[in-house]
Amino acid sequence: MLLRGLRGALGWALSCRLPGPGWSRGAGGALRLQEAGEGRAVYSPLVQTARCYARPAKKKQQALLSHLDDIPPTMLKKDYANVPIIDKVDDVVKRLLSLEMASQRERVKIKMQQLADKVRRSPSDRGSCEVQTAVLTAKIQTYQEHLHMHPKDKRNRRVMLMAIDQRKKLLKYLRRTRYDIFERTCKVLGIEYMLPPPYCRRMTRRWVAKKAFCLKVFNEVQKRKAPERLKQRREWQAKARAAKEQALQSEGTPV
């Protein structure tokens, strides 16, 4: 409906007046420029714009390097890597059992295992903070590549943000308890850890009045407790002085 209205208005505007010599009206009332000797018509830019305005140009998506590219496609799947007769099978069977024909989920599992092997403390380590961080790192990189191709996928974006928050908690715990392991894990996995921002509270009139009242009450309590604290301090000093005099007398040294 909009296209019909645009074409009608354009035809009425072009029927009122021709731009100048050398122009003629073609089929449908469109203006075209007669070029001598070539036998072809060049339509005006306005007509070309009106014809192609509803065809948006598609943006070419740049190819993104995947974090799974370092996995060789000839590598066998985990279930078939240690089979003794795998070397005797046909090449077609090997290709079917390799990662070339595997799904992305299986390749991501291989990537998780590779990253976990780099940071694990011992061969039997399967649940330490470093291993969990490596697994979450592989998942986060997979979600980032998916969202680069499908930016409107809100469900996967939410899952990715939850994984990032969980990894931040693990790195925060490692940084507080084992700083050497924390540095090694960030270096091996290529993670740039940023400190959380300091707590900042918005100041309101109610909050300012409440804080002033609390400070006033605290100062008043300190004033009331001052005589009692002074009395206790003098008693402690007198006891310390008496104990020192008694120790000197026991040694036989005059005070």
Image (cartoon, rainbow, N blue to C red):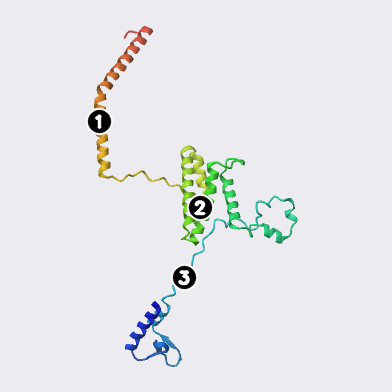
* Viewport quadrant of the N terminus: bottom left
Q: Earlier in the sequence, mark 3 or mark 2?
A: 3
Badge 2 element:
helix
| Residue pointed to by mark 1 | 219
- Amino acid carrying label 1: it is Asn
Q: Quadrant of the C terminus?
A: top left
Q: Residues within 10 Å of mark 3 (few under 14, many from 20)?
A: few
Regarding residue 8, the answer to whether it shows in the image is yes
Could you classify mark 1 by the number of other residues whose Cα lies within 10 Å: few (under 14), some (14-19), or many (20 or more)? Answer: few
Instruction: Say what amino acid the circle numbered 3 marks.
Output: Lys
Tell me where residue 65 appears, x and y as whole percent.
Answer: 53, 59
Q: Position of residue 217 (x, y in %)?
A: 25, 32
Residue beneath disc 3: 58
In-front residue for pair 37/66: 66
Distance between mark 1 and mark 2 Cα atoms: 52 Å
Q: Is residue 31 visible?
A: no
Assign a secondary structure to mark 3: loop
**Given the image, on which type of amino acid does mark 2 rest?**
Ile
The residue carrying mark 2 is: 140
* Circles 3, 1 touching at the beta carbon (< 8 Å): no
Q: Is residue 121 above or below residue 98?
A: above
Residue extending furthest toward the front: 1
Q: Earlier in the sequence, mark 1 or mark 2?
A: 2
Mark pair 3, 2: CA separation: 28 Å
Q: CA distance from mark 3 to mark 1?
A: 69 Å
Of pointers 3 and 1, the one earlier in the residue sequence: 3
Q: Residue at x 37, y 83 (%)?
A: 8
- The image shows residue 79 at horizontal and vertical percentages of 67, 51
How many other residues sit within 10 Å of disc 2, few (<14), some (14-19) or many (≥20)?
many
